Each structure stands twice: as C-alpha cells, then as structure tokens.
Amino acid sequence: MKSPLQAMRDLLHDDKRYKVEAYQFIREALQYAHEHVLESSDTSAGDQGPRHITGQQLCEACRLYAIDQYGYLSKMVLANWGVHSTSDFGEIVYNLIRIEQMRKSESDEREDFDNLYTFDDAFEPTFELASHDQE
C-alpha cells in the first residue's frame, strides 16, 4: 500500500495538468467550506461531526477562499496552478478521491462541478457605493 505522500507524487507524475498547490488549495477550501459555507447555511447542525460538502458547495467555498487569500489576484494564482474553471476543481477532487485522499458519497458525480460559474466573473472585484444617508 502506498503512503499518502507517494500516492500524491505518483498522481503529480501521472497527471501534469495541476500543480501540487492546486491540490493543497482544494484541501484548504474544503476546510473553509466546513467552517464558513456550511456554518452559514445550516445553523441546526449541532455536533453531528463533519457534514458532507457537495460539489456546488465546494466550488463556492473555493471562490470565497481564493478571494479571501489572494484577492484580485485569485484568477491569476489559480491559472498558474492549472486551474481555469470549476470543472478543474472537479478534476482535482476526483484525482484526490482516486488516490483515497478524499471521499465521495453515492450521489456525488464528477459533473457536479461543471460550469457553476466563470472565473472571469467570479473573481472580479465588486464595489459597493456607500450611502451618506444616515437613517
């Protein structure tokens, strides 16, 4: 049986599309999803342990985490790692599932990650005009 480190080395050798940083980013975004996305969407979870994150939720967590970590440079940083779309997030996740570094439920499908948002729109800065009216 391969060690997790050897499994990752083999994966990086076999699939050169993504850099190791992309895989680390997905792991960190998954943790971010557990801490922020699920927390804000389910206040009745209690102490049930870690809940399952869907592909859609993970993609949203990736978007928010990238903005939190890299700000306006998010799209460029992800592109440098070989990540250009939410489909790439899915490819990375399923590579990690294949080497038993992540798990999936029976209802999960690789296609759950496809075309959820475009990177051109998702990482553009948003500006809000502050109102000077004090109510």
Image (cartoon, rainbow, N blue to C red):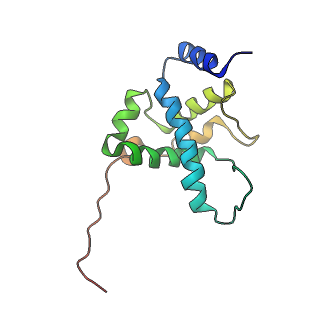
Tally the numbered discs.
Answer: 0
Where residue 27 appears, x then y in whole percent? 56, 37
Quadrant assignment for the C terminus:
bottom left
Q: Residue furthest bottom?
A: 135
Going 46% across and 46% down the picture, which residue do you hit? Answer: 65
Going 54% across and 55% down the picture, which residue do you hit? Answer: 36
**On screen, 127 above or below 1?**
below
Q: Determine which quarter of the picture holds residue 82.
A: top left
- Front-most of 114 and 41? 41
Where residue 46 appears, x then y in whole percent? 71, 62
Query: Is 92 left or right of 47, judged from the image as shown?
Result: left
Where residue 69 appears, x then y in whole percent? 40, 44
Going 70% across and 16% down the picture, which residue do you hit? Answer: 2
- Front-most of 63 and 8? 8
Q: Determine which quarter of the picture holds residue 83.
A: top left
- Front-most of 81 and 34? 34
**On screen, 35 above or below 105?**
below
Quadrant assignment for the N terminus:
top right
